[in-house]
Image (cartoon, rainbow, N blue to C red):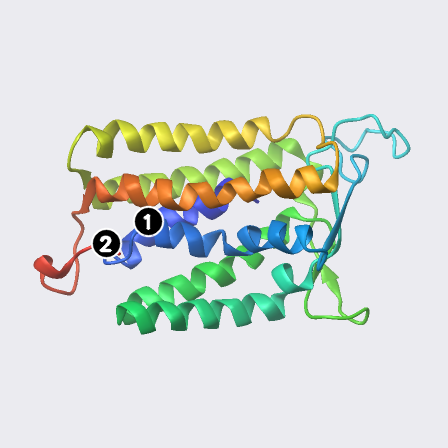
Amino acid sequence: MFLGHYGLAFAARRAAPRTSLGTLTFAAEFLDELWPILLLVGVEQVRIAPWLTRMSSSTLPNDRHQQSVTPLEFTYYPYSHSLLMAVVWAAVIGALYFAIRRYGRGAWVIGLLVLSHWFLDLPMHRADLPLWFGDTSPKLGWGVWNSIVATYVIEFGIYAAGVVTYVRVTRPRDRIGSWGLWAYVIFLAAIYISSNGPPPPSERALALTTLGVWLFVPLAWWIDKHRYYAGRVDIPIEHVTAR
């Protein structure tokens, strides 16, 4: 899952009007922001294996030259992508946000966004998402990545719903808030489509490239600063400042 996480961040702006889209994006993508760091320091492992998932069920299982929906075998990543650690990270990041901003609703939304990452990944991945640490942990995944059509329908469906929600509850302050938003939306979609090309040359190259997801946090914050919340809120409008 990629676009779906950003779609949920867009939609969450409605639930937490005082929280910046940048912060919401950070929370929704946190597990994938942490993952390449852990790869680079050798704490978690991945293997490039283009034959694991197929774009169609008719692909021969031994044809390793067939392009796959995702060319990765996630061999070990309990610190970033186990359900147990997703719960822990959700609690920690939500608590830190509350300690800094003293905004309870925002803290709950932030925590739920962190946790949502695991549940959005669940239908897409093959059975490689661990529940906890160790060899005894079950690994779950429904394998939607085996179908490019189903993958795109789910990814773009969640993404579009989130963008529509965001547009309905915010208004542009200037041209950046208008044209900049749509440039950002299209850019994310283009990045996702282009990612389904040839596999990366190495695991290290994959990790370094994936670190680029951190750039979307300040970019989302910047776009959001040029828009204002226009939906209904349960607090005085003068206090609705995105942070």
Amino acid type of the residue that numbered disc 2 sits on in the rendered structure: Ala
| Circle number at residue 21 | 1
Amino acid type of the residue that numbered disc 1 sits on in the rendered structure: Leu
Q: Residue at x 70, y 42 (%)?
A: 204
Left or right: where does residue 229 sit relative to residue 162?
Answer: left
Provide the secondary structure element on which disc 2 rests.
Answer: loop
Nearest the viewer among 73 and 147 is: 73
Residue 107, placed above or below residue 215: below
- Label 1 or label 2, whichever comes before in sequence order: 1
Can residue 42 be seen here?
yes
Q: How far from the left and from the top, in percent, is residue 108?
A: 37, 68
- Are the residues flagged by discs 1 and 2 in contact, CB closer than 8 Å? yes
Q: How far from the left and from the top, in percent, is residue 220?
A: 35, 42
Q: Residue at x 16, y 47 (%)?
A: 230
Q: How far from the left and from the top, in percent, is residue 150?
A: 61, 37
Q: Residues within 10 Å of mark 2 (few under 14, many from 20)?
A: some
Residue 94, placed above or below residue 219: below
Q: CA distance from mark 1 to mark 2?
A: 8 Å
Q: Image quarter for residue 67?
A: top right
Nearest the viewer among 109 and 27 is: 27
Q: How far from the left and from the top, in percent, is residue 115?
A: 51, 63
**Residue under circle 2?**
242
Can residue 2 be seen here?
no
